[in-house]
Structures are given as C-alpha cells and as structure tokens.
Image (cartoon, rainbow, N blue to C red):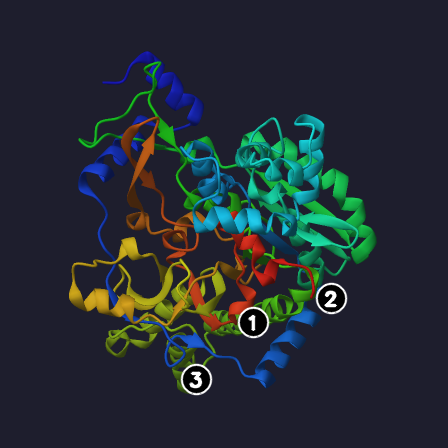
Amino acid sequence: MLTPEDNDLLARKQISEAQLNKQLKQFADGFPYLGISASASVERGIRAVTSDEQEKYIRIWDSYPAAGQRIVKFVPASGAASRMFKALFEFLDAPYDTPSTEFEKTFFDNITKFAFFAALDERLKQSAGKSAAELIAEGRYKTVVSHLLRSEGLNYGSLPKGVLLFHRYPDMARTALGEHLAEGALYALNGDNMVHIHLTVSPEHRTLFEQLVAERKPYYERTTGAGYDVTFSTQSPSTDTIAVDAANQPLRDASGALEFRPGGHGALIGNLNDIDADVIFIKNIDNVVPDHLKPTTVRYKKVLAGILVDTQRRMFDYVRLIDSGDYTHEQMVEMIYFLQNDLCIKNLDTKYLEDAELMLYIKRKLLRPLRVCGMVRNVGEPGGGPFFAFNSDGTISLQILESSQIDMTDPAKKALFERGTHFNPVDLVCATKDPDGQKYNLHNFVDENTGFISQKSKNGRELKALELPGLWNGAMSDWNTIFVEVPIETFNPVKTVNDLLRAQHQPWG
C-alpha cells in the first residue's frame, strides 16, 4: 500500500506505480537465463586482425574525420573510489596498527611510487605536522591512511576515480580524467580539430569534475594542439530501482521512505541515447595508461573504429540496394553471407523464406545500431565474456554475457562458460545512426529480460537490488555486434589502489 509520501517520492523520481510494481514482480519471478550455443573464439566469432588488415583499417579511420562526421568519446565516470581502497579502510578498522597483510605491506613499502604521494605528504605536513616518512617511522601508519582516505586529508575514499591522481610525470601528476583527455586527442579528433568527451558522473561530484576540467583544459589544449568540448550528464533518477528484503517486500529507510538504489551501468543507455554523434567510443574511466604506453591503445582504437566505419558503409549500401528493388539473386546471397559471416547472425529458417520475406528479414537486421568490441585473451581478470546467444526471434548472434546470465547448474552451459578464451574489457566503438543520418532510439534495442538481482548490504541490513540490463550486455542485446581480438596491453584497469603499482601505471623506466 503506497502512502502519499511514497507517491510524492515516485513523482520526484518520475517512476510510475506500474513501473514499481513491475520491479517488484521481477524480484518475485527472477530473470530467465540466456541460452548460449557456444563461446566466441578466434576460430569462430572473434576476428584476429592481421598486420596488413590493421594498416587498412587505420587508414580508413584516419580519413574518416575529414568528411565532417561527429566523433564522441563516452566515459562512464560515476564510479566511486571507495572499493578501490577497501583493503585500506579495513586496515583503519583493524585491531592492529602495523601493516600485517600482504596488501598493506605492499602499499607502505611502495608508498612513494604513487602519483598522489606528493599531495598526501604535503597534506600530512599541514594537518599532522609531520611528513609521511616521519609518521611511518613513528609507527603512525593509520594517520597516513586516514589522511589519504578521509576529509582531514585528500578524502580519496569518498571521491570518484576520475579525479584521483593516477600517473606521475616529470612536471606533474595526472588524473584518470586527464589521461582520457590526452588519449582522446590521439584517436577521437574531429575534422574541426575538436575532441568531444562526454562523462557520466554522479550528481554530487559533477561540480568537482567541472572544476577539474576548467582548471586543466588549457594545459591539454596547449600540449595536444586540439580544442576540447567536455560535457557531463548524470544518471536519471527514473532509472533507480526499489530495494527489497529477503521476502521481496519494499525496504524503507529510518524515516519510513521507500529505499531506491541506482540501476547499475545499464541505466546509462539513456545517457548514451542522448549523444548525437556518428561514432562513439566507450571506455571505462580507470582503464588508462601513461603517455609512453598509449601507442598500442591508440593503434587498436583506430583498428576497431576502421572496422566499424567499413562495416557500416557495407550495411548502408545493402539497405539502399534493398530499397531500390534492383538486386540480383547473387546479391541476395551476398547479403545473407554478410549477416552470417561478418555480423555472425545465424537463422536456420531463412531457407524457407520467400524472396520478399527474406529481404525484409535482412533489412530488419541491417537497420540496427552497430558496435565493434575489443576482446582480450582470458588471463583471469574479471569481465563478461563473448558468446553466441539465442535471441527471442529465434536467431543466434554475438552477445557479451556475465556469469549471472548463464545457468551454471547446467553442466553443458557451465562448460561453455569455462572454455571461454576471451573476456570483455569494455572497449567499444559504436555507430548509432541509420542510413539517413537519423539517430536510432537505443531503448528499442534493449532486452528487458537480461537484468539481474544482486545481494547487497547497507547499514547492517541485507537487501536485494535490481540491476538493469547492463550497458554493454542486455542494453545492447539487439545491436549488430563484431568482436575483435585486442592485446592485453590495451586493458589496464585500476580496481585496487595497489594496481597503480603495476608497471603499466608507473613512469617510463
């Protein structure tokens, strides 16, 4: 039973009572597992691009901006850094005062190697009256950590990853956001010499991002020679989902208000839908490297984009050919092979279709957003995997799936998952317009049945949360998809603070 206060809250969030009831029903019913026929591999489903092919696609991409199309780099940047410092928060709460775990020892043994060390050291001198070295010598390790994580110091435990200092340079330290600005000029430069970067941020951190961009943009414009147009959006409150208890009853906070939670990165499909661009690069905020390691990343970004542009041109040509009605039987066969071999769409029923029905089927499959996704060899890193999955229309196509979407109690499905050779590093290049240059409504290509339910804890209470179909999972389920193998060197995420000690995040030499 909803109270007047509940109705007011729903109105402010622009969530209807019908949407609320639908979410509660999803908790009760759960989500179906997706059927998979195989994991994608370089033998089938993932392109391994030769050196000559790489050069071809790089040339295609390098010539693309001259035609005046708009290129945007889209960076989900709302993630808080609190999980990055989880082990250090645990140290602060531990009954001991001296680093004891391997993680804690590694952090303190290498503390001067972090890009944020100079700023931390200065803050300690101002606030605690002593340097980090002096405090460590006195055994005051927790004072050092507290000044890194809490508001008396750098407050890194409450800030978004994008504004943290990641890398050291001879003259400065650079944030994750700064690395994205530098990187954008190397492969996402528009024909008018502008770099358009769009970041999705949390509402409470938007001002912080805007201030950082205003402060640092002149530096990057000076060093890259490019202009920067940096825009921001926040996740809409209408994408929040209700939290429930173990009995699937709505939870309420201490004041009695219904408790909602963000719907996960899948909620960002609305933000992506608002981007007006011909090509959109998508990459997570924490997957960046210093300048001396950028060439490999840039090379493969251009390869992915070249494949996208080349494939889209063929798709548009086929659509126009179908619309003309002036095509041969050989061209019909060519289009079927294009769907099967280039887009990896399989439909066992096409041989039973009349020519007119077949053309409608082909056109329907071609008139969809296109994404080209980098895939990295599986080396134990977390991430969804590339699979051939069954679709509601009876076709089989490429999908990025998380383990939660696969029935692991089925030995055959579990074996397919475990045999996967690659994983998704969130390295996408997308085209979201039709042959007439009109934007697709991306909401029309979401599979609503691919959300999932997760177990959470808040203020000592166990709760269940509803995650919307993931941005590169179910939210792009009905897109045309191409997987391309990219080297592990292009994937350098920072999941814990000690990841910044890896060679990929340290200065040259």
* Residue placed under numbered mark 1 in the picture: 313
Q: Could you say which disc has been placed on residue 180 in the image?
A: none
Q: Tell me how many marks there are.
A: 3
Q: Are marks 2 and 3 in contact (CB under 8 Å)?
A: no
Q: Dot 2 surroundings within 10 Å: few (below 14), some, or many (20 or more)?
A: few
Q: Earlier in the sequence, mark 2 or mark 1?
A: 2
Residue 463 to residue 343: above or below: above
Is residue 455 found left or right of 9 in the rendered image? Answer: left
Is residue 126 found left or right of 501 in the rendered image? Answer: right
Structural distance between the alpha carbons of marks 2 and 3: 34 Å
Question: Residue sitting at 21 percent across and 59 percent down?
Answer: 408
* Residue placed under numbered mark 2 in the picture: 66
Is residue 418 found left or right of 131 in the rendered image? Answer: left
Q: Earlier in the sequence, mark 1 or mark 3?
A: 1
Q: Amino acid at mark 2?
A: Ala
Q: Amino acid at mark 1?
A: Arg
Structural distance between the alpha carbons of marks 2 and 1: 16 Å
Question: Residue sitting at 59 percent across and 79 percent down?
Answer: 54
In front of the other: label 2 or label 1? Answer: 2
Question: Residue sitting at 60 percent across and 32 percent down?
Answer: 147
Residue 439 to residue 464: above or below: below
Q: Kindly state the secondary structure of the residue where label 1 is placed.
A: helix
In front of the other: label 2 or label 3? Answer: 2
**Would residue 349 be visible to someone looking at this image?**
yes
- Please state the horizontal and vertical placement of residue 261, each as a whole percent of the image: 38, 32
- Please state the horizontal and vertical placement of residue 428, each as a whole percent of the image: 51, 61
* Residue placed under numbered mark 3 in the picture: 328
Name the quarter where the C terminus is drawn. bottom right
Structural distance between the alpha carbons of marks 1 and 3: 20 Å
Q: Kindly state the secondary structure of the residue where label 2 is placed.
A: helix
